[in-house]
Image (spheres, rainbow, N blue to C red):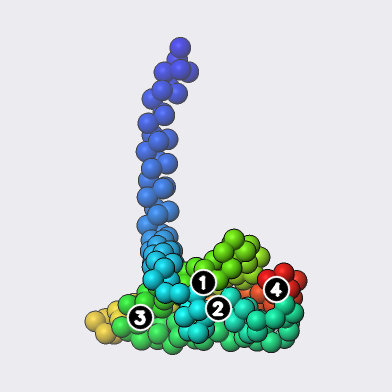
Amino acid sequence: MTRTTYSHINRPKKKKNAAVSLRAFIKKRASLNLLYIILMAGIVCGVFFSFGISGETLGKLGFAPAQNTAGAGEGSANFARVFFSSFSASFLWLMLVFILGFCALGMPFILILDFLQGVGFGISAACAYSLMAGKGILYNLALLFPGTFISFIALIYACEAGIRLSLSFFGVIYSPAKQESLSAECRAYFLKFVIFIFALFAKAFAEALTALIFLRFF
């Protein structure tokens, strides 16, 4: 009876500790969660935006599936060309985030870039379905999703790092004493983006490989 009583008494404390830990975890990842939400909102907006435009028009705007993957409408893919095209496009987004991180007012622009990345993906995925119907779903699964998943992860963490550094520069405006810690923060920032660049290499390799294997079927 005594053990049962103590177990009953301790249970609320365990629940309270679990709730506190959960709140701390959510608060710690608040910026990441916000970036994920904005990205998903961009994807949804991109899909809805593409509903009012024909597949041919989207193709002319550069959202045609073959252009996104291999740069040609043929069944065979050139590995090196796809790799370079994929890496250069993602690298441009990453460098924009990198530069904005050094701007005291860069945070809102980083959030906009995050949203636009989602919009672009939403339009591309919807365009593939619009032009190829049922095959478009397979196209997205085989060719678009693998590399894009890696790219999104890198972009989300890059945006978070850029926002944190941007806020640090903004804080220096009101508290110059914080400037001493900026040098160490900038070094860590550079290191993170080196890792993100390697992630983009992996993304480009994944897209080139999947294009080489699967594009012939589309």
Residue closest to the eye, 129 or 79 = 129
Q: Where is mark 1, residue-wise?
A: 127
Q: Say which amino acid is labelled 3.
A: Phe
Q: Where is mark 4, residue-wise?
A: 215
Which marked residue is nearer to the observer: mark 1 or mark 3?
Answer: 1
Q: Is residue 18 visible?
A: yes
- Sooner in the amino-acid sequence: mark 4 or mark 3: 3
- Which picture quadrant has residue 195? bottom right
Residue closest to the eye, 209 or 194 = 209
Q: Judging from the image, what secondary structure is the residue with disc 2 in?
A: loop
Which marked residue is nearer to the observer: mark 2 or mark 3?
Answer: 2
* Mark 1 neighbour density, 10 Å: few (under 14) some (14–19) many (20 or more): many
Disc 1 to disc 3, how far (Cα)? 27 Å
Q: Is residue 167 left or right of residue 158?
A: left
Disc 2 to disc 4, how far (Cα)? 13 Å
Most extreme residue toward the left, as rendered? 174
Q: Say which amino acid is labelled 4.
A: Leu
Q: Residue at horizontal 41%, vertical 18%?
A: 5
Q: Residue at horizontal 36%, vertical 86%?
A: 103
Q: Is residue 216 above or below residue 6?
A: below
Q: Where is mark 3, residue-wise?
A: 109
Circle on res. 64: 2
Quarter of the image for the N terminus: give it: top left
- Sooner in the amino-acid sequence: mark 2 or mark 3: 2
- Sooner in the amino-acid sequence: mark 2 or mark 4: 2
Q: Judging from the image, what secondary structure is the residue with disc 4 in?
A: helix
Disc 2 to disc 1, how far (Cα)? 6 Å
